[in-house]
Image (tube, rainbow, N blue to C red):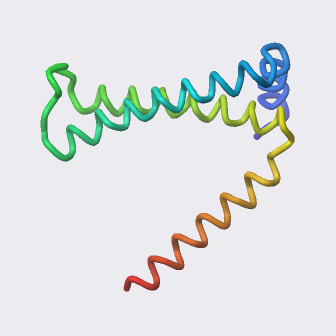
Amino acid sequence: MNAKRAKKLIQIARYYGEEKQVCKLIEELGEATGAASEVLMQLTFHEDGGKNTDFQTRLEHLAAELADVQIMTEQVLMLFGLEVDFKVARMKGIDKTLKQIRGED
């Protein structure tokens, strides 16, 4: 992340504080889950769930919700000093999945 963006995010995070930003992260995760479910419903069942929403609109909604999750995740990581732990865990997760894939082949 570039320094200008990080400065903006930490300013927001510090303004609202740890408790509010963790709560906001939970809220955004829930909204992203809902958006992902709508995409999955269309992919799996080819239904619109009565919402008359086209697939591209659902994808755009998912992208917006994931952006919100990423913004909140970055703020929470900064607030608690977890950036390095996050990067290590992310790499371990990638390596674990690749190992599983190689085992399935």
Q: Above or below — where is 99 with respect to 7?
A: below
What residue sits 19% from the left and 47% below the top? Answer: 44
| Residue 73 percent coordinates (x, y) | 67, 36
| Residue 82 percent coordinates (x, y) | 81, 45
| Residue 25 percent coordinates (x, y) | 62, 28
The outermost residue toward the top is 15
Q: Above or below — where is 99 with respect to 88?
A: below
What residue sits 69% from the left and 28% below the top? Answer: 22
What residue sits 24% from the left and 32% below the top? Answer: 55
| Residue 57 percent coordinates (x, y) | 30, 26
State the image quarter where residue 68 is shown: top right
State the image quarter where residue 85 is shown: bottom right
The front one of 20 and 92 is 20
Where, quadrant-wise, is the N terminus in this rendering?
A: top right
**22 sits left or right of 83 in the view:** left
**3 sits left or right of 47 in the view:** right
Where, quadrant-wise, is the C terminus in this rendering?
A: bottom left
